[in-house]
Image: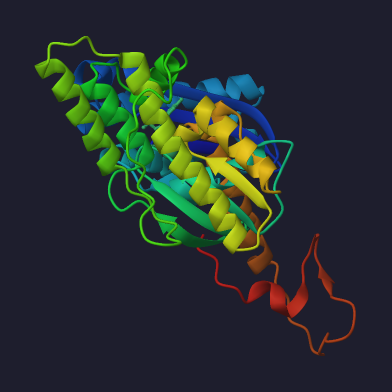
């Protein structure tokens, strides 16, 4: 099955071709960083106009990279939300038009579900159920993923998302947008113990996050240094701030895995590209007997391969539901029936509500 994935929820126009839910034949990402960086953040109106200009060439580039034509595509998977409405509309309308013109079925995919499942684009994969830490520009949460379509929220941020905190701190330090990569690059040259920024552990065993405190602490530190006429130790600020965020993210994720008695943890979302978070999580996991799975950085940040992958599982569920046949006798205690080219688990396999 060849799926074309389309992603346009924020400031990346992306298209990907995925074979049989496993093999990425093409993944093209057109970033709008140059358009938005003069403004220090994403300007929604500019983003949707850029998507409009980019979507057709990006999809064409993905098909070329995969060495196929549109006629060979079996299904479309497109991001439905969450994100910027104007941006999302461009991708969804494009997919609907392709579907109508070419008679290709399409499924709508939740962007966060795409991130949650992005680890299945890799060779090394966790076993269900696993704990996923999803950290992006708009979301920071810990989820228990029971299967491709069953997710339970265990914790989430009470204020800023982790990526948002990186972006805001970068802005007040005068660093370019997006802030995450800029901070992690400078942090390499800094001392992560130089400044003791606060860690918000919150109550007891809470799996929730809060990053507004550490962001304010950095702002206060910078203001004081400027008032005193001191030179800003930018690399040390970056390293110390990054450490405060990373420590909380990693400790809470591993603690959540422990309390849920789950041995596998996967990282997801743009902040998952942060080298220190990857290192910290892996080391902490190893010391506590937890296996940590890391998607490659290109599959942490926004991409359409993860949307195609999540869409593939929506199609599988829809196919299974359509493939359901009647049966006259109970199968309890007997081998499960097979129908058509799909085999499925009999009576129990089709009675679960799926979000797709
Ligand atoms: O998942 P993503 O590409 O888009 C959203 O769904 O939001 O995440 C973007 C976020 C931005 O806030 C960006 O600063 C952050 O991910 N990010 C990073 C790094 N690379 C991207 N944060 C920390 N370190 C990085 N290396
Ligand atoms: Zn994202």
Q: Which residue appears farthest toward the right when viewing the image? A: 334
Q: Quadrant of the N terminus?
A: top right
Residue 334's image quarter?
bottom right
In percent of width and height, residue 107 lies at: 51, 51
**Which residue is found at the position 63% from the left and 36% from the top?**
283
Picture residue at 85% right of the left edge, 76% below the top: 336
Name the quadrant containing residue 17.
top right
Q: Residue at x 47, y 61 (%)?
A: 154
Left or right? Give the position of 211 relative to 121: left
The picture quadrant where one finds residue 219 is: top left
**Residue 66 x/y as whole percent:** 65, 24
State left or right for residue 226 relative to residue 111: left
The answer to which of 240 and 345 lies nearer the viewer is 240
Residue 9, image x and y in percent? 37, 38
| 325 relative position to 227: left or right | right
Vertical position of residue 331 compared to residue 68: above or below: below
Q: Quadrant of ligand 2?
A: top left
Up-down: is 333 above or below 52? below
Q: Is residue 174 above or below residue 296?
A: above
The front one of 293 and 224 is 224
Residue 106 visible from this viewpoint: no
Q: Which residue of the protein is positioned furthest toward the bottom in this rendering? A: 329
Percent of width and height locating residue 291 = 69, 45
Residue at image position (73%, 81%) is 326
Q: Judge by depth and name the residue closer to the eye, 237 or 95.
A: 237
């Amino acid at each position: 099955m060849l799926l074309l994935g389309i992603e346009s929820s924020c400031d990346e126009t992306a298209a990907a071709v995925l074979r049989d839910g496993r093999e990425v034949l093409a993944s093209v990402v057109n970033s709008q960083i140059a358009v938005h960086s003069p403004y220090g953040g994403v300007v929604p109106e500019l983003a949707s106009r850029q998507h409009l200009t980019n979507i057709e060439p990006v999809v064409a580039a993905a098909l070329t990279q995969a060495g196929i034509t549109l006629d060979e595509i079996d299904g479309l998977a497109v991001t439905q939300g969450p994100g910027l409405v104007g941006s999302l509309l461009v991708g969804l309308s494009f997919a609907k038009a392709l579907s109508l013109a070419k008679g290709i079925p399409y499924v709508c995919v939740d962007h966060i579900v795409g991130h949650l499942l992005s680890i299945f684009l890799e060779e090394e994969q966790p076993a269900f159920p696993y704990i996923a830490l999803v950290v992006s520009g708009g979301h920071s949460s810990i989820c228990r993923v029971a299967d491709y379509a069953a997710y339970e929220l265990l914790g989430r941020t009470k204020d800023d998302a982790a990526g948002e905190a990186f972006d805001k701190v970068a802005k007040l330090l005068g660093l370019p947008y997006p802030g995450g990569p800029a901070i992690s690059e400078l942090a390499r040259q800094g001392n992560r113990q130089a400044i003791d920024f606060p860690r918000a552990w919150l109550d007891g065993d809470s799996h929730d996050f809060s990053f507004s405190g550490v962001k304010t602490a950095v702002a206060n530190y910078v203001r004081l240094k400027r008032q005193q006429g001191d030179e800003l130790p930018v690399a040390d600020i970056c390293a110390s701030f990054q450490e405060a965020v990373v420590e909380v993210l990693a400790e809470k994720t591993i603690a959540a895995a422990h309390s849920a008695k789950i041995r596998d943890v996967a990282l997801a979302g743009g902040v998952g590209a942060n080298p220190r978070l990857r290192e910290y999580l892996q080391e902490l996991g190893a010391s506590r007997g937890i296996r940590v799975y890391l998607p490659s950085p290109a599959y942490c940040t926004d991409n359409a391969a993860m949307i195609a992958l999540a869409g593939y599982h929506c199609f599988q569920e829809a196919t299974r539901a359509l493939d359901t046949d009647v049966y006259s006798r109970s199968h309890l205690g007997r081998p499960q029936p097979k129908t058509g080219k799909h085999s499925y688990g009999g009576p129990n396999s089709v009675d679960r509500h799926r979000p797709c």
